[in-house]
Amino acid sequence: MATVPVRLSTRSAEPVGGTGLVTDAERRAAEHRHRRTVERDLLSGDTRWRSTPYEAHVQFSTYCNLACVMCWGDRPPPSRRLEPAVLARVDAQIAPGLSILTPHDGSEPLAVGWESARDLARRWNVRLSLVTNGTFLDARRIEEAVPLTETLFVSLDSHVPEIFEQLRPGADARRIYANAAAAAAACRAEGVDCIANIVLMVENAPFLDRTLEWLHAHGIDSANVIQLIDVNGRSDMHDPLRHLSVEYVEGVRRRAHETARRLGSRLIWLVGPTSTTDARPRPTRATPGADLRARRVAYDRWNERLRLRHPGYCPKVFDRVRVTVDGATGPCSYAANGELEYGTLATHDFETLWNGETARDLRRAMATGDPPVPCDTCRWRDLPARRSGLPFTRSVEAAFPLPATGLVVDAPDHGAR
C-alpha cells in the first residue's frame, strides 16, 4: 500500500507549535517538580495534596462517526461539545501543570473538538496522547497532530476489511488502513510511538497473528491487545472469554507473542493477566525522537517505582484526572456511573475538587487498602509482578549495608534488616 508523504515541522527548543507560553526546558523542569511533589504527598500521609495531575483525559466532545460494537454501538449519546465554562477552567487551572493531554471518552478526537485540543496543547506545550479510529487521520490532520503527540493509538482490530467493518459499523476499512500507514511513517520520522489498539473479540481472535504480521508490513511495530468490556450491555456476544475456551484463548495469546518475537515487534497483552513482548531493535542516539523516548522512559520508571513503593495504589489516583463534556471530574474513565466523581468544573474551581472530600477519601482508601467498589477488582490496582531486584535496591544498600558475607538473611535483599 502506498503511503502519502507528509511534511512535518522540525522540533526545536521553542514551545510546540511555536506560539506557546511554556518552553521545553520549562516543561521538563515542571515535570521534575511534579514527580518530587507527588512522592512527598504520598509519603506524608496527608490527603490534601500540593501536586497536580500529570495527565488529563478530557472529553472535548461526545461525537463519533462510527457505531463500534464494543463502544456505544447503534445507540450513541447526543453529540455535545465541552461546555465553554469547563474548557476555560481546564485551560486556566489544569493545563498549565499538565504534561499529557488525552482527548478521550468514547469520541473521535480528530473530528469535533479537535481544534480546542490542538490549541490547548500548543499553548501550554503539552503532549497529546491520541486514540483515534483513523477515519480523519488524513494528511492535514497528520501534519497538525504528530508534532504535538507523544503516543498515537489507532484502532485496528483486524486486517480483514470485512471483519473490521463488521466490528466498527460505518468504517471504510481501506481508507483507514491507508491513513494508518501514512501516520505510522510520519510518527517513525518524528520518534512518536504509533500503537495499534486491538480489542480481542470472537471475530478477530483466530486471525490475530496474521493481523500482527499485516501491521508490521505497514510500519506499525507496537500493538495493544485489549480485553472487551461490555460497557453498553449488548456486546458480550463478541466476548472471547465468554464464548471461546480458555485453552483456545491461551493459544491465541501464545501465537501472538511468538509472532511479535519473530517480527521484532512489541505486543502488550491486556486480556486477563498482562504479558509483554518487546523485541524491537534497541534505539540509538541517531534514532529520531531521542528526547521523547527519554521523557517516556523517565516517567515509566518513576511510575513503576511508585507502584512498588505503594502497592495497590492506583496511578490514576495520584496523577490523572478525567473531565467530561459537562464538567464531571474524577480520576479515571472506568467508573462510568460517576462513583468516583470529585464534582463538576462547571460550578467549582479545580483546586476545590482536587482536594475536595471525595478526592481525599479516595486517597485515604488507596493508602489503607480500603478501595471503593469500582476499584477493588480493577487491573490498575494489581500488585507488581515479583522480581529478583527492585529499582531502588542500590540506594537502600548504600544507606543500610547488608550483613557480612556468610550470615544467612531470611529476607529479600531490598528488605534485609
Image (spheres, grey):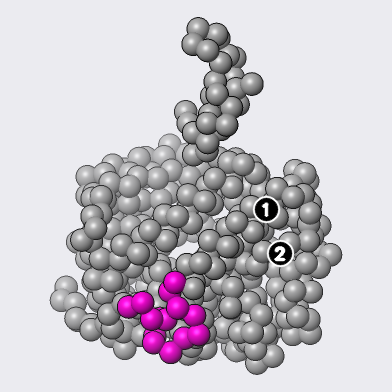
Q: Is residue 80 left or right of residue 352?
A: left
The kind of residue on which mark 2 rests is: Arg
Q: Which mark is residue 143?
A: none
Q: Is residue 286 above or below residue 78?
A: above
Q: Quadrant of the N terminus?
A: bottom left
- Label 2, secondary structure: give it: loop
Left or right, 369 with reference to 24: right
Judge the density around disc 1: few (<14), some (14-19), many (≥20) Cα neighbours within 10 Å. Answer: some
Location of the C terminus by quadrant is top right
What residue is rendered at 47% in x and 67% in y? 28
Magenta segment range? Answer: 12-25
Which one is in front, 26 or 366? 26
Residue 100 pos. (x, y %): 51, 70
Q: Earlier in the sequence, mark 1 or mark 2?
A: 1
Residue under pointer 1: 40
At which x and y percent is residue 238? Answer: 49, 58
Asked if the stretch drawn in magenta spans residue 17, the answer is yes
Which residue is at a point 49% across and 11% down the rendered structure image?
A: 405
Q: Amino acid at mark 1?
A: Arg
Q: Verify CB contact (< 8 Å) between mark 1 and mark 2.
A: yes
